[in-house]
Image (cartoon, rainbow, N blue to C red):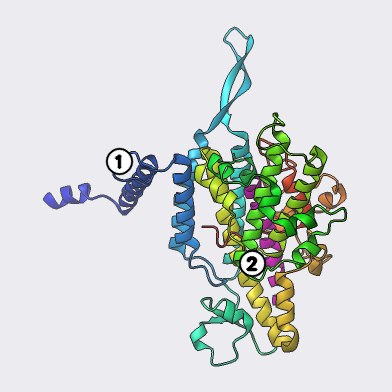
Amino acid sequence: MDSANNNSTTPSPLAKDRHSDMELMKEKFAKLLLGEDMSGGGKGVSSALALSNAITNLAASAFGEQKRLEPMSADTKAKWRKEIDWLLSVTDYIVEFVASKQKAKDGSTMEVMATRQRNDLHMNIPALRKLDAMLLDCLDNFKDQNEFYYTSSKDEDSGKTTRQEEKWWIPTPKVPPNGLSEVTRKWLQYQKDSVNQVLKAAMAINAQVLSEMGIPDNYIEALPKNGRASLGDAIYKIITEDFFDPDCLLSSLDLSTEHKILDLKNKIEASVVIWKRKMNAKDTKSSWGSGVSMEKRELLEDRAETILLILKHRFPGIPQSDLDISKIQFNQDVGHAILESYSRIIESLAFTVLSRIEDVMHADSLARNPPNAEQKKSSVKEQPKEEQPEVLKSNEGTPTSKTLLDFMGWNLDQGDTNNNSMKKDSIDDVGNKPLNKPANVVTNKKISYIERLENLGGLRSPTARH
């Protein structure tokens, strides 16, 4: 009798797991409420920054060791999906009022205000979830491949390449002596195209959210008085010439290290902020005023933003700028914080997968054509903007070539109606149901920066951004 009572009171494994998940969720949200200050002294960070840090840290624990093209472990994937759902559930309660019609008992209708999820979250959170799932599915696709494998740097006897010296901590991919088969090579290119489109979409959302975040006062207070002081005389002279060539400007500068590239980016972003503030200033006699005309400031701002886009295109590994870091740190909008951090970690994973695919393609190129392999690898990293189309030319016209429109079901290019109609049903090849999406990434402001970014076709890596 006693044994029967003991069996009836023993919780099942499923009940234990639910209890464990509940306790873990309580702990996580308690830390968020305390602003990561476990002393309870009120010295914690804002809720927005606490959520941003939580998403970033979760991604680091889940994807930090993703150094090979292989599926994530089942436990890691389950943990990622479960805990990211917890953190994203906050957005379900970020709402806005909208007009709605309600029918009374007597049959009459009246207009009342109802709540719904904020529009930018309602459109972009499902899109980011879709991109997230696509990346995990891409890693799962490498489960059964057997044409390449990995060796650690310790297993290399001699002849280290430039790639191995730059990424000594990453396992080295090995391919057959004659390279990959034609079928595997085309399949690998298809995977690269798919991940590249995911990266562009996540980057676009992240860049737009950052552009909507307010510029903190402490960043503005630290700015130089004018754009010339920020850029320096040499750069300012080139950027103000009648005939301006951004490629010529960049070729005249020393961009040999990541620090120098980031320093240039910080200077240009600071000058853009200065010129925008001067154009928006009402008091022309204030300390922000000068003798520069409004038209010239607009021209300088346009040229500076063009340089920023080219930098992001040519150097996809640079960390976040001082302006971006400052915006994230002092942002108070929880919705923006979640969108920014979630899109940033998807960027990070997409760029990591893209880099691992390029490593395998480089090893294949080295096996097939050793003398020219290093040159081809460098050309992949730093292509001129006119050679980087929206859809990679190498697969143009082949049945494996797809764009983001195929996977997401978005209509991002209103002018290309013929191509859109041809790509309407290609989502079935991936095995996912298309996600209805409006013409552009939905935000609360007019999109101009993203359109310029898409036209350039540039990419930005978030690898050093958290």
Amino acid type, callout 2: Leu
Q: Secondary structure of the magenta portion, mostly?
A: helix
Residue on which the image places disc 2: 354
Q: Describe the element under mark 2 as helix, strand or loop.
A: helix
Query: Residue 235: percent from the left, percent from the top?
Result: 74, 58
The one of 254 and 385 positioned closer to us in this rendering: 254
Would you identify the image quadrant in which residue 382 lies? bottom right
Cα distance in 3D space between marks 1 and 2:
43 Å
Q: Residue 40: which numbered mark, if any?
A: 1
Q: Is residue 281 above or below residue 271?
A: above
The residue positioned 44% from the left and 40% from the top of the image is 46
Q: Which residues are magenta?
A: 179-208
Q: Residues within 10 Å of mark 1 (few under 14, many from 20)?
A: few
Along the polypeptide, which appears first: circle 1 or circle 2? 1
Residue 245 on the magenta segment: no
Q: Is residue 69 visible?
A: yes
